[in-house]
Each structure stands twice: as C-alpha cells, then as structure tokens.
Amino acid sequence: MSVERTAKTSVVMVVICYAVLIPSTLAMIFLSRGPVMIAVTSAFAIIAASLLLAWATESAQFLVSQSLALAILALLQVLPEYMFEATLAWNRLIEYASATMTGSNRLLMGAGWPLIFFIAYAFSRKNGTPITEIRLDERQAVEAFFLVIATGYSFIIVLKRMLDIIDGIVLVVMYLTYLWVCMKIPEESEEEVEHVHGPARTIIFMKSSVMRMIVIIALVMTGGVVIFSSAGPFVLSIIEVALILGFSQFLFAQWVAPFLSEFPESASAFYWAGTVRLSPMAIGNMVSSKVNQWTLLIGTIPVIYSLSIGHLAFIPLSHLQVEEILLTAAQSAFGCVALLKLRFTWKEATILFSFWFAQFLFPQIRIEVTIAYLVLAVIWLVYYRKQVTIFHQFKKAMIEHVLARRR
C-alpha cells in the first residue's frame, strides 16, 4: 500500500472515531434520558476514545520509551475504573467498590491476557507460522517486576483485613516509583518503526515533528477527557439498570461495569495482538494496566473514603471482601510466576482463562479456585526456576538506564 493511500486510510479511521465519539458524547450530555440510553451512549464514546489512545501511544513510544508510553496509556485507560471507584468510595459504597476492583482485576488477567495470546495465535496461524508463546522484550521486565511487588503487597492487605491510609501511601509511592523508572528507559529504535501500521505509522512519518507532537497530544487529550467524563454516568446508569432488571447490584458492580471499564486496555491490546509482531507490547499494556490497578487504583480508595468522611479512616473488609481480594491476589500470583521467564505460553493462557471463566460462572467456588491458583503458582515456580529472568533484566535496566545517568 502506498504512503499516500496509507495516510488517507489512517485519516478516515481517525475521522470515523471522532464521528462516533462526538455525537455519542453530546447525546450522553444533552439528550440521553434513562439509564439504558446513558449506558449505551457512554459505551460508544469510550470505545472510540480507546482507539484514539491506542494509536497515539503506539506512535509515542518512538518519542519516549515504550515503558513510559505504556505507563501513560495505562493510566489514561484505567480512568473509567478510577471514576467507578472514586464515585463508590465517595458515596461510601465500599462493598461495590471492592467488587468493581476485584472484578476488573480478574477480568484483565483472566480474560485479557489469554485473549491476547489466542488472537496472536490465530493471526500467526493464518500466516503459516503458529506461535506457542509470546516472548516479552527484556525492557518489559520493569512492568513485570513492579507487578510482582504489588501482588506481594496485596497479600498483606488480606492478612490485615482492612484498607487504610498507610496502604494508600505505600501503593501510590510504589506507582510513582514505577513511573519514574519507566521515564529512564530509552525510546524504541528506528528499525522497529517498520512493524507499526495504520494511523500510528502515519503519525510517526509526519514531516513536521511539531505537528506529530500536536496530533499525539490531541488524540491523548481527546481520549482521556472523553473516558474521564463518560465513566461516571456509565457506572450510575448501570446501578439503576440492575435495580430495574432485579439483578444483584454486587454482580453488576463486579462484572458488568468492568467489562466496559476494561475496554480501553482491551481495544489497544487486541489491536496490537492482531499484528502478532506487537503482541509483546499488547501484554505489556495489560501488565502496565494491572500495575495501575494494584497500586494507584487501590491506593486512592482509602484516600477518597477519608475525604468523604472528613477525617482519616480505615476501611474494614468483610469476610466476602477478603475472599474476593485473596482470589484476585492468587490469580495475580500465578500470572506473575508465568512472566518470571518473560514468556507467556499457551498453557498459561489456557489456565488463566479456564479458571477465570469457571469462577465467573460459579462464584461459590472462589476458595477452590484460589487454592488451585496458589498451588499452580508454586509448581510453576519450581519447574521454571532456572528460567527466571525478570530480576536479572530489571537489575540490568536499572544499572544501564537509571543508575548510569546519575553517575
């Protein structure tokens, strides 16, 4: 395809997104009446905004490091979930806040990670060379390392059976440290540009660097503002829909809302997975989003809750909430062990999806699934102990890109 034709196609794709996004946003603000209409219009707006963010970040990784670009993308993509948690915490609906938090986390890893592999496998098989694993870039050890640390801290929250301002401080500092390290990682090499397609490629090859930066900022700002403004109306409308239909508000908070809040991550990650070559970046996007949710997202809940009450307060966790967080932590533990070797295989994708789907259909087996995750995590750790590489690669990245610049 010629450069001119590629550019025209890219412009059409961006225009289509804006053609969906602008009317949906305006309709949501001025015309929508009733929870169903609000849910539909906000969903369309978030879908279009997610694609704009994906293209902007894919091109931005050649101006800053891929780790930083993915960290910023993940922060913007998790905005719907942040808004859900902020709304529920402010209204002191902690049971629903924990439901959306655990549901979105498990959906991200239990369905998101496996679907990336399955999509990449399908497209690679179509090209005649089916893959059996996705090999992550060495620099993605940064995301994987911080996910391990955040997962470890989640077990501390379970043991305490409460969430307090100290947890908030620790988790926010953990996220800021992660972001700081990402800023030190160098940008992608120019050779990697050849593997980029669509609007992102058109942006990269713009003759004017100023125009390129303006376009990237415009897409990021548009996507971020739309997602930020659409999340609140969506979560409120979903709760009303649950009441109208007579369904459990807890289940709606845990699964229905996260299906949309996780769409921003899914849209960009599945888009990259379809290219096969960018499937490691897709996994990196999901891992970065998981780090966001395990640190900044959870850390802001006690802060907003305290602001709502008017003084520093801790949030006691009920027996159900402890079980839900423990299940989520156990799933994350298995996912972390799977990434210790910087490879994500078909076996791990199958296990994560099967266990997530089983617990989705039968919530009452959460304890059995928790035990299975932890047992498999130990088995995987023992079996692949000689292939563990993320700690070495993280140390290497710190020496080469963080500590070296300070000397």
Image: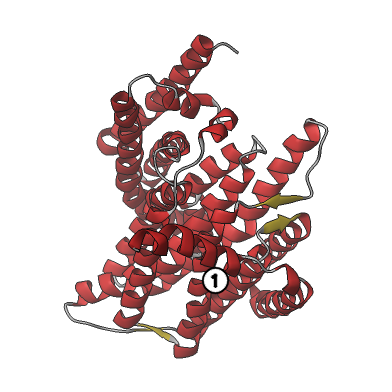
Front position in the image: 313 or 276: 276
**x and y, in percent, of residue 363 in the image:** 63, 70
Where residue 218 sits, quadrant-wise, is: top left
The residue lying toward the viewer, choosing from 142 and 254, is 142
Looking at the figure, which quarter contains the N terminus?
Answer: top right
Q: Is residue 264 above or below residue 19?
A: below
Q: Is residue 299 left or right of residue 360?
A: left
- Secondary structure category for the residue under label 1: helix
Image side of residue 192 versus residue 181, left or right: right
Is 24 situated above or below 146? above
Q: Position of residue 12 (x, y in %)?
A: 46, 17
User: Along the horizontal axis of the image, is 367 left or right of 307?
Assistant: right
Quadrant of the rendering where the C terminus is positioned: bottom left
Placement of 221 over or under 315, stated as above or below: above
Identity of the residue drawn at 36% across and 49% down = 231
In which quadrant of the rendered view does residue 109 lie? Answer: bottom right
Residue 202 at x, y percent in the picture:
46, 22
Q: Quadrant of residue 336?
A: bottom right
Residue with the most extreme front position: 407
Amino acid bearing label 1? Val
Q: Residue at x 51, y 38 (%)?
A: 189
Residue 284 location, x and y as percent? Answer: 55, 52
Q: Residue furthest right?
A: 128
Is residue 247 visible in this depiction of the protein? no
Residue corresponding to mark 1: 148
- Number of marks in picture: 1
Q: Residue at x 49, y 10 (%)?
A: 4
**Along the line of sight, the residue nearer the viewer: 148 or 33:** 148
Does residue 358 appear in the picture of this structure? yes
x 57%, y 46%: residue: 281
Q: Nearer the viewer, residue 60 or 327?
A: 60
